[in-house]
Image (spheres, grey):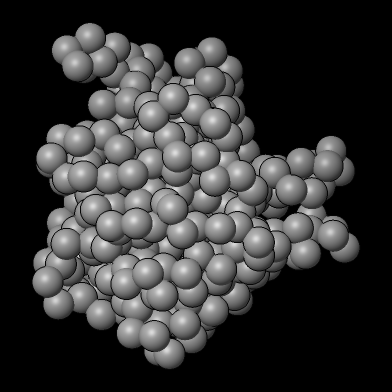
Amino acid sequence: MFLITGASGFIGKGLQETLKQRGLPYRAVSRRTLPGYVPIGDVGTDTDWSEALRGVDTIVHLAAANQNVTEGKTADSAYRAVNVDGTARLAKQAAAAGVRRFIFLSSIKANGEMTEPGRPFTPASIPSPDSAYGRSKLEAEQRLAEIGKRTGLVTISIRPPLVYGQGGRGSFEALVGLVRKRLPLPLGSVENRRSMIYLENLTDIIVAAALHPTVTSTVLLPSDGDAVSTPQLLRMVASAAGTSAILLPFPVTLLETAARMLGKAELVQRLTQSLEVDSSQTCGSLGWTPPFTMREGLDRVLSPRLREKE
């Protein structure tokens, strides 16, 4: 029996669909009271998981304080209360209840915000998170590892890059909106490398980690495979959506300078800098291959023709 926390969210709904397709039993937990979900209230140091844990052998912990918390003096404590202390509370109760595996959805932000050319993040990379959110995810991983060593609970932390799929919201969806409006974008000169992961690839590796017969406590860095530049991504998005991208060559240094002056530095950095993941070690450790390439994932999300068939 799987227990899914944060089950009513974007990734949680996708994981439920994957488990249904494979006939795997699960219990969906949500902070709110919703039909078909077990209400648990706020996740923190006082959460009582005892009822939700009955009969569970694998936890997939998706519930988290997300990246909308304002960065600043209170950001670390706000993230820590849920992402660190709340996660540790659940893991301790899970171990006491006889749960076998604890799969924690971390984030590539536990590694950092960018990579240098030719130096993608791997499970062996030394983490250096730059944000309160990333720091909280890394600390949660470390707390889980400590609990696992003391109790025998197998803890698996998964650090995905940007996740895209049907029903998602965020920077990827904003980018798609710009492409669909056919707005000229001054990104034609960008030569970066960005990794992403399609939602169904992410839920597939979650299940693979849960069912693998010999997996031990570890950190996994999955992706769709090959990283792409921002111009390549925009062209792939446009092709999947049945349109074309209008990309204008523009010096990247001038673009970043203008962004800083307009208070949009962080947004532009995501489009101009690299964040590349080498998932080869992760794939090898589980004998896992992403079911979909990035192009196939984008087609499934954006192609009207494919959506009509589903």
- Report whether residue 144 is seen: yes
Q: Is residue 11 left or right of residue 173?
A: left
Most foreground residue, 19 or 304: 19
Residue 78 lies, with reference to residue 70, above or below; the image says below
* Residue at screen point 70% across, 62% down: 81
Residue 100 lies, with reference to residue 233, above or below; the image says below
Outermost residue toward the bottom?
150
Q: Position of residue 213 (x, y in %)?
A: 12, 71
Most foreground residue, 197 or 189: 197
Dividing the picture into quarters, in which one does residue 22 lie? Answer: top left
Q: Is residue 184 left or right of residue 259?
A: left
Q: Position of residue 221 (x, y in %)?
A: 36, 65
Location of the C terminus by quadrant is top left
* Residue at screen point 60% across, 57% down: 47
Most foreground residue, 33 or 117: 33
Q: Is residue 124 left or right of residue 47?
A: left
Q: Position of residue 85 (x, y in %)?
A: 63, 68
Most foreground residue, 65 or 183: 65
* Residue at screen point 17% across, 62% down: 211
Q: Position of residue 61 (x, y in %)?
A: 44, 56
- Report whether residue 120 is seen: no
